Image (cartoon, rainbow, N blue to C red):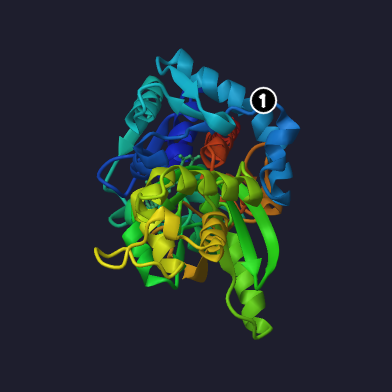
Amino acid sequence: MYDVVVVGAGPAGLMAAGAAGAAGARVLLLEKNRGPGRKLLISGGGRCNFTNAETDMHRLISRYDTAGKALFSPFARMGPTQVLEFFASRGMPYKTEDNNRAFPRSDKSSSVLQVLLDYIEEGRVTLRTQTTVKALRTDSGRVQGVELQDGSIDVGSVVVSTGGLARPDTGSTGDGFSWLEQLGHSIVRPEPSLVPVVVEEDWVTDLQGLAFAELRISLRLGEKTISKTDGKVLFTHFGLSGPGILNLATRISQAAAEARKQGQPAPTISLNFFPTLDGGSLDRQLQDELSAYPRRLLRTILESMLPPRLARCILAEAGVSTGLSGEITASEVPKQLRKRIVSLMQDFRLTYRELQSEDWAVVSSGGVPANEVDFRSMESKMIAGLFVCGDMLNINRPSGGYSLQICWATGYVAGLSSAEAARFQHG
Ligand SMILES: Cc1cc2nc3c(=O)[nH]c(=O)nc-3n(C[C@H](O)[C@H](O)[C@H](O)COP(=O)(O)OP(=O)(O)OC[C@H]3O[C@@H](n4cnc5c(N)ncnc54)[C@H](O)[C@@H]3O)c2cc1C
């Protein structure tokens, strides 16, 4: 006999189950995978950027889309300060990197998962893995239980934390969305949102694996710049990834849709590899190098300024041979070619083809609209006793720990309120 059933043992479900257990409820946590937290383990490249340590609440909320206003209430109870304290006080030291991104000091996402496993154990939560929930049972607008493959469980409080649709191989297959839709919620169609970009240029495969800490990324339609940002960029075999690109993905696909509608060519992504220099200074720097080493190959000089594979790619784009025969020396570089190379170093363009599929997405947009959930309790406004948290919610967020911060806060509140609701039902 359980007071609360939590469906899905990702970060939101683990936090919800632990909080409900700590509040005294008898909790059953159901997970269809062999083990909990599969997506959590691959988060942040296996290092897990587990929150964003921004302490100014208004600034923090401004990073989410307009639906993020709803987060004021759960963040007041489990904001970044409390999250850092939660993990640190349970034996997980942390460190903060650029842009307030917080990581476990171990650089291992398994440290984050371990804290959550200890938390559910403390709360005497029963974790049942390899158990798929098939449906929710309700009657007259109130939850009655959950249906499994082989039977059902009667319970008056259910937390649905089955995640979004990004990376379905980790178990997030959108099951909760179909259940809630059948129960009257208007699910916003999930689309991959923080997702890498596929480009037209096949030669991008030559650059696979190159990573840049801070580039200026401009999104262009023809010669018009429609968006500009600074961020990390990673070249992949199909195109571009890294936080700077992921954060622009939705904007890029919107721009492409607009361009298509107006019969214009696809947008381009322009990368500036020297964002702190203006064109004149970079040109002078290259000119100095060329004059200092007139007999050196142009390729060798560029390879000292850029990763060699990128240098060769820029030379190829500028029409300069990088083969054994036909290479030119520094003294042979005409002004026009030098200008073209400088321009490619600061305006290196790749043509947008499409966003990668949700198999590659870090998060998907869409889900349960924020106005259909009471964020003071995380209870559905349509079905009593049904609580929703984590990636199930339609709140767009950038890369940088903002996603897991939603999971901790909404999971915590959902856990406490589901326990409270169960107490009320039992009188
Ligand atoms: C590659 C990658 C890197 C990321 N890095 C970061 C990062 O560094 N920082 C950050 O803030 N965010 C990051 N994210 C996003 C973050 O991982 C998610 O926001 C978070 O995992 C969502 O947690 P959740 O509990 O809502 O859902 P999920 O983690 O998706 O968990 C849902 C769980 O429910 C289970 N489930 C689904 N259906 C059923 C069912 N019918 N019955 C039983 N169980 C079910 C699933 O198996 C799964 O275990 C990353 C995501 C990816 C894919």
**Residue displayed at 34% across by 67% down:** 321
| Horizontal relation, residue 317 to residue 408: left or right | left
| Horizontal relation, residue 251 to residue 29: left or right | right
Does residue 184 appear anywhere in the picture? no
Above or below for 2 versus 293: above
> Residue 6: x and y, percent?
44, 41
User: What quarter of the picture does the C terminus occupy?
Assistant: top right
Front residue (pair 336, 390):
336
Q: Residues within 10 Å of mark 1 (few under 14, many from 20)?
A: few
> Residue 308: x and y, percent?
34, 50
Q: Which residue is mark 1?
A: 55
User: What quarter of the picture does the N terminus occupy?
Assistant: top left
**Residue displayed at 47% across by 21% down:** 95
Label 1 residue SS: loop
Q: Amino acid at mark 1?
A: Thr
**Residue displayed at 39% across by 37% down:** 28
> Residue 159: x and y, percent?
50, 43
> Residue 230: x and y, percent?
60, 46
Name the residue at the bottom extreme. Answer: 263
Quarter of the rendering containing residue 93: top left
Above or below for 87 versus 297: above
Does residue 332 appear anywhere in the picture? yes
**Residue displayed at 45% across by 54% down:** 241
